[in-house]
Amino acid sequence: MIVKMWPLQKESTANQYTSLILHDVIEYKPHKWNLKNVLDMRFDIFHMHWPETYLNLPKRYQQLIGTLCVVLFLVVCKLFSKKIVWTVHNFKPHENHNNIKISEFFRTFLVRMVDKFIFLTEVSKDEFLKIYNIDNSRLTVIHHPLYQVNECCHDISTANHSSINNKYLFFGLIRPYKNIELLMNEFIKYDSDSILIIMGGCSNTLATELRKMKKKIDFKERIKFKFGYYDEQQLQQELNQCKGVIIPYSDIMNSGVLYRAITAGVNVLLPRIRYTEEVVNSLKYQGAVFYDPPLDTNDIATFNGIPSVNHNNFDVDTYNTYIKNAHYELYQTII
């Protein structure tokens, strides 16, 4: 069996997801948007993640060209009797760059072309079915894998206790919909010596806006920006030194940040919505502290009162083997 995957990251990178679902008995090929690769039809299944990537580009012509490339390639796949699988990480775009007509056309097209849809939660599958009338036999749920890290323990016995008592962390791609400005405002209102680290990739425009905002608020020294790429070692160091991770989103359908924080075993302050409750309950995670969105100062005060405890008791290898086998079994059903 040969699976062509887009994107395919076999090594640990900023986003480990695709590397964590690869099964040993399957041959994988990375899909790249060059003529040689596009014309290579020596595979059985085309498995795509984030096909909506081009819809999030800022320029209309970029959206059109990128979307057209995906459409034409999927048509060719069908002409060559290839099976198509879509892991639906996001079925609604986070950003508002995209043209509504292009977006609606593309998603309707995908629904018609895809043989199997993979959802990371029952909640996301249910929400998808509210929009699209699809035979349930084409849909399946395979949960997000846990992350592989060398030192995924928040070890209170060896960590610097003073730093753990006053440092909180937000990490991941920094985007307007993630409510970073709200987090900054509410964090500063909380009267303590706590420090908030905001860490991750950020556009120059948004980074400038956040820096301007920081200059206008009191106690600005309590907020520290670490914009840009970070590797796994840098992230783990911050997780080891923080008292908890704060997720200020109002609504999410999937979140690698949540799974990474859970793998690290740290306390996590997160919105009480159907998605987060399903993830926390499925993993029986004891470090979750819920708030009713939007996030406010009282939520942060409550979170500050939670003791720092290592909640990591997962057998990551066993859990991820189950996830890999679930993908393999799905592939077997369609070829």
Image (cartoon, rainbow, N blue to C red):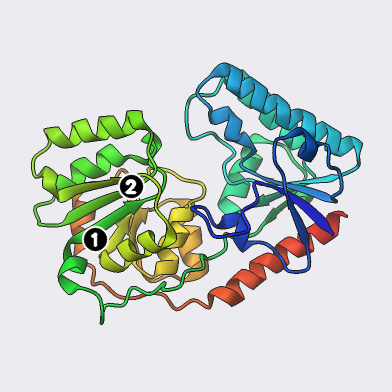
44 w.r.t. 104: above or below: below
Which amino acid lies under the numbered mark 1 shown in the image of this protein? Phe
34 w.r.t. 231: above or below: above
Q: Is residue 249 left or right of residue 6?
A: left
Q: Which of the 4 image quarters holds residue 332?
A: bottom right
Q: Secondary structure at mark 1?
A: helix
> Residue pushed farthest bottom?
157
**Residue 95 visible in this rendered orientation of the protein:** yes
Q: Going 59% across and 38% down the picture, which residue do you hit? A: 91
Q: Secondary structure at mark 2?
A: loop
Q: Position of residue 274 (x, y in %)?
A: 48, 52
Q: Position of residue 111 (x, y in %)?
A: 73, 36
Q: Which of the 4 image quarters holds residue 179?
A: top left
Q: Nearer the viewer, residue 292 or 217?
A: 217
Q: Is residue 152 left or right of residue 332?
A: left
How busy is the neighbourhood of tag 2: few (under 14 within 10 Å), some, or many (20 plus)?
A: many
The residue beneath circle 1 is 303
The residue beneath circle 2 is 248
Q: Going 9% across and 45% down the picture, which residue do you hit? A: 219
Which amino acid lies under the numbered mark 2 shown in the image of this protein? Pro
323 w.r.t. 230: above or below: below
Q: Which of the marked residues, 2 or 1, is nearer the chain's N terminus?
A: 2
* Separation of marks 2 and 1 at Cα, in angstroms: 13 Å
Q: Which of the 4 image quarters holds residue 159?
A: bottom left
**Residue 189 visible in this rendered orientation of the protein:** no
Q: Position of residue 256 (x, y in %)?
A: 48, 54
Q: Are marks 2 and 1 in contact (CB under 8 Å)?
A: no
